[in-house]
Structures are given as C-alpha cells and as structure tokens.
C-alpha cells in the first residue's frame, strides 16, 4: 500500500525529448523512447508554484541510495515504472498512448494520467514530460549509467 504522501503526487514521474508541438516522433526518436533499458528519473518539478516546487529527492542530482526510478516504454505500448523511495519499491504498469507529442498513461487500474507534452532531445538523450502542474525530466538509462561512471572518483 502506498503511503499518504504519495497519494497526492503525480501518478507517473516523467522525462524530456525535443519534438515540435503536435509533431510525431521520428523513427529514431521512437526507437530511443522504447529503448529496453528505459529512462532514469532525474527531476520532478511542480511548475504550478504550489507548496513544493521540486521533489527533494529527484532534484537533478543522483541519490541512488535514497531514491531512483526507471520508466520503460515497450514497443507494444505498455510501460513499467519502478521507483525506489523512502526505503520501498513502488512499481506501476499499464499502457501508454502516443498522439503526436502528447503522451497519456493508463495504469493497471485503468486510471488515465495525462496527456503530457513530450519533448525528446536525442543529442542529450533527455526526455521531458510536462503538464500544467508537473514537469518530469528523464535521461536515457544507458546515458545515465555512462555519466555516473564518468563522474566516479578513483579509489585512493
């Protein structure tokens, strides 16, 4: 069971791409979106100006021992979201619908989340999903791991 602090949060955490308004994804963008390793959550912001403007754990810096999350988009329009936060793993799954640059989720209970405006930036390997109240930023999992390895300090 989810704790009360998660009940009022956006159901899904999201990411950034680079698609013009209303434009369909190119074949390469779609292939990147559906990468089997998925997308690592980087930042979650409440752009509405409400009480909390940025999630303390998903603040743009890695905190793998406190929180982490991956979203996987399969070619059959299913998704899996795995979030580790507050010492527990939360997993959601369902289907997604892509219409131009609009992405909507339908979870395992049939609850709709979205549509989010999707922006996929292939060079930076970043995905942003945005609605009026929330902005989610993700990085291609392979790139996230590569970046983390590059920033590790050598052992002394």
Image: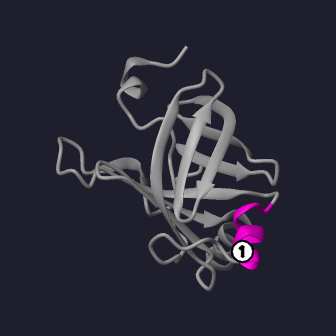
Residue 61 can be seen, yes or no = yes
Identify the image's colour scheme: rainbow, by chain, secondary structure or one colour. one colour
Residue lying farthest to the bottom in this orientation: 123
Expressed as whole percent of the image width and height from the top left, the position of residue 72 reads 72, 50
Q: Residue at x 48, y 69 (%)?
A: 22
The quarter in which the C terminus is drawn is bottom right
- Please state which of residues 56 and 129 is positioned toward the viewer in this rendering: 129
Q: Residue at x 48, y 38 (%)?
A: 113
Answer left or right for 145 relative to 21.
right
In the rendered image, which residue does mark 1 sit on?
Answer: 146
Magenta stretch?
27-35
Q: Residue at x 72, y 52 (%)?
A: 73
Residue 142 vertical position relative to residue 75 in the rendered view, above or below: below
Q: Secondary structure at mark 1?
A: helix
Q: Residue at x 29, y 52 (%)?
A: 132
Answer left or right for 121 relative to 59.
right
């Amino acid at each position: 069971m989810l704790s009360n602090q998660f009940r009022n949060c956006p159901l899904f955490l999201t990411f950034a791409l680079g698609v013009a308004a209303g434009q369909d994804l190119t074949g390469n963008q779609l292939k990147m979106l559906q990468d089997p390793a998925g997308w690592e959550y980087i930042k979650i912001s409440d752009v509405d100006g409400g009480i909390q403007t940025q999630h303390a754990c998903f603040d743009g810096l890695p905190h793998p021992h406190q929180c982490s999350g991956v979203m996987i988009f399969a070619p059959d329009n299913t998704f899996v979201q795995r979030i580790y936060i507050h010492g527990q793993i939360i997993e959601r799954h369902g289907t997604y619908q892509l219409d131009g640059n609009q992405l909507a989720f339908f979870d395992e209970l049939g609850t709709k989340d979205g549509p989010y405006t999707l922006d996929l930036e292939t060079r930076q390997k970043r995905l942003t999903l945005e609605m009026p109240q929330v902005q989610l930023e993700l990085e291609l999992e392979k790139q996230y791991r590569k970046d983390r390895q590059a920033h590790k300090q050598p052992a002394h």
